[in-house]
Image: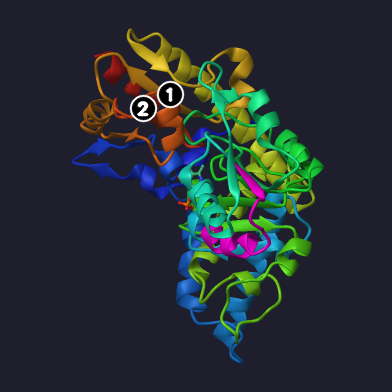
Amino acid sequence: MAYDITRIREEFPSLTVTDEGQRRIYFDNPGGTQICQRSIDRMNHYLIHANTNTHGPFRTSHMTDEIIDQTHAALADFVGSDDPGEIIFGQNMTTITFHLAHSIGRTLRPGDEIVVTRMDHDANISPWLLMARDAGCTVRWIDFDPATYRFDPSSVESAITDKTRFVAVNYASNALGTINDVKAVADAAHAVGALVFVDSVQFSPHFLTDVKAIGCDFLACSAYKYYGPHQGMVWGRRALLELLDPYKVRPADDTLPSRFETGTQSHEGMAGTLGCIEHFEWIGETMGSGGATRRERLVAGFDVVAAYEKDLARHLINGLQSIPGMQVKGLSGEADLDDRVPTVCVTRDGVDPETIARNLAGHNIFVWPGHYYAIEIIERLGLTDAGGMLRIGLGQYNTRTEIDELLTVLEG
Ligand SMILES: Cc1ncc(COP(=O)(O)O)c(C=O)c1O
């Protein structure tokens, strides 16, 4: 069995859309992927057959409760948890993170320390800076080395002290593409009794997470980054989620996951999220080694996706490096390809990223210029005044031919 890119592309209706007869090339995936057919079908079905609120004594409400339960169970398998109650849904990763920060902040005392990193998207920095401000805590930073694009080990060591109570760290950078050793950070944090929050938003589209193997306390991701609808979620360790004091309305159920799922959720979003998990299962069954359980099918699906995307990343990076004046800002050696997601940022001598992106847009090739909220990274690389970097983000439906088209425009 092999990865069948033609079959994969058939699962994404938006790939066939043209504009004045011209095809589209979506390399804007780290900002949001195209949605798969199974997600669309699940959402349509929910909205036509089951649309209402929860816990009512009638059919549509039973169906709504059922889809919500099914999606929590699917997401538990997706992150490697045995407990669907540990999955909290919300509008997006940022909103749930701010929400949880209120509750986590109540456990902190003045003089406690928290740790954030310069490699994170601001959604995994600002909620914690504000939490620290409100609780009177000191903030320490983990830095990365702009020459290696990896965390500076001495910075990890010095940032985590015996006063550290909370560490927020990103799994894969939305700009550099680096995959971080979050287990090592979690081990260091737990050694001093601190909690660990992992941002997996950019890791989860490309690799399967395993919260037990990482040993973290929270892990966040967003379905619209992995071929589903606009829907965020955070996994949290049950004992902690039960201990924390949620900011909730009084009549709302105080059990998990409801105590942290504020207000009426996007039920169609949950249905669509279930659809994209089923999409990965389908890949595992039809193109990978399959499996008896959902988790096994997901492992099989991600295995073949990761191998395909690694090949694409190699092709893109090699092509970009052969263009005069183009610099890849991230891991680029063959030996480093397993330590990155296929999100590749570049700068070009004498041309700002916005101009390059507009030129590519003229060819209906979609890429992001700027900072994409990774403002600490851009600052650390000294690129704030230069307009940041151009980000080319690959996904499971991209092809070598699309990359060649991009390279041809860039070379021209
Ligand atoms: C690494 C990372 N973390 C967090 C976020 C925020 O996710 P959301 O849009 O679900 O709030 C993003 C969005 O691009 C991201 O790339």
Please identify the residue farthest to the bottom as the structure is shown: 57
Point out the stretch of residues depicted in magenta: 96-115
For residue 181, which quarter of the picture? top right
Tell me residue 263's x, y (percent): 52, 76
**Upstream in sequence: badge 2 or badge 1:** 1
Contact, mark 2 vs mark 1 (Cβ under 8 Å): yes
Residue at (66% x, 58% y) in the render? 108
Q: Which residue is mark 1?
A: 381
Q: Amino acid at mark 1?
A: Leu
Q: Amino acid at mark 2?
A: Met
Quadrant including the C terminus: top left
Tell me residue 319's x, y (percent): 42, 14
Quadrant including the N terminus: top right
Does 112 appear in magenta? yes
User: Would residue 347 appear left or right of 152 to someone viewing this image?
Assistant: left
Tell me residue 134's x, y (percent): 54, 59
Q: CA distance from mark 2 to mark 1?
A: 10 Å
Viewer-proximal residue among 98 and 330: 98
Q: Nearer the viewer, mark 2 or mark 1?
A: 1
Q: Which residue is mark 2?
A: 389
Find numbered disc 2 in the image and state the secondary structure of the residue it sits on. Answer: strand
